[in-house]
Image (cartoon, grey):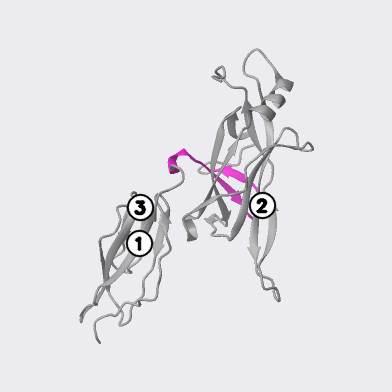
Amino acid sequence: MAAPVIDPTTSILAYRVGEHFVYQPAATNSPTSWTAEGLPAGLAITSGTGRISGAATEAGVYNVALRAINGDGASAPLFVAIGIETSAYRPDAFVEVNVDISTGKVSLVGGEVSETAVLFGKKGDWLMLSVGFVKGGILQDLPVSVLTYVIKEYDLEGILVQSAGDFEKIGSYEATRYRIVCHLDPVPVGNALINYDDDKGTSFDAVSELRWGILHELPGDEDPAEFERSSQNFTTAIWRDLAPDLA
């Protein structure tokens, strides 16, 4: 048996700071161990399989020397360029929310589905959500085309506020999440709060849902079709501002 030869055809897409990274190289001649030199901080290689995973902590372009090893020696190094882009948002600023795609139920990560408020915000706040789609307890990497967070005062009334529909996909495979932001516009939210005006603690429980589009390729169609879905209703508690407006 000869020393391993690493397959050079595997490509790596650009990742972002804080995004979960997974890369599985392949090689001939049954390598028994792998090494990688020059990995970004936050990424590590599993020596037995060559799988590189983790979440990079700094942006940049990293030229990684990858080697596969067996009892007859080591492969020639394969130099792989890994690009890590800056993230649009700080990952620790997001509230993680999961949607069970079988039932449509929404829950906070690490918590049970709430019968009362799942989220809360004040007039004028920006709500920042990291949405995961779960099936059988495992996060799914879905071909999401649009993702919106919708809030109504009552279920049968018109939309009070809604996110723009764009999102930032973070991670892949079993670590995929989708980041969105929604502004609690002070005008419509303030008008709704008037209906619950009190000396202090003015608030109401708004009806909320998440809506998303999934791209599917249908037989005979050249372009994939977009199918819309929505979650079950959940509650977002909306509060009057606790401090006077500065404007």
Mark 1 Cα shell of 10 Å, populated few (<14), some (14-19), many (≥20): some
Residue 86: percent from the left, percent from the top?
40, 49
* Contact, mark 3 vs mark 2 (Cβ under 8 Å): no
As helix, strand or loop, the secondary structure at mark 1 comes to: strand
As helix, strand or loop, the secondary structure at mark 3 comes to: loop
Could you tell me if residue 116 is visible in this image?
A: no
Magenta-tinted stretch: 91-108
The residue sitting at 35% across, 62% down in the picture is 82
101 vs 94, nearest the viewer? 94
Please state which amino acid type lies under the numbered disc 1. Answer: Ile
Identify the mark nearer the N-term, 3 or 2.
Answer: 3
Residue where numbered disc 2 is placed:
103
Give the label on residue 56, or none: 3
Identify the mark nearer the N-term, 1 or 2.
Answer: 1
Please state which amino acid type lies under the numbered disc 3. Answer: Ala
* Contact, mark 1 vs mark 3 (Cβ under 8 Å): no
Quadrant where the N terminus sits is: bottom left
232 vs 189, nearest the viewer? 189
The quadrant holding residue 43 is bottom left
The residue sitting at 68% across, 33% down in the picture is 206
The residue sitting at 40% across, 58% down in the picture is 21
Locate residue 158 relative to residue 29 in the image: left or right. right
Could you tell me if residue 86 is visible in this image?
A: yes
The quadrant holding residue 71 is bottom left
Give the label on residue 50, or none: none
Q: Is residue 105 magenta?
A: yes
The CA distance from mark 1 to mark 2 is 38 Å
Give the label on residue 82, or none: 1
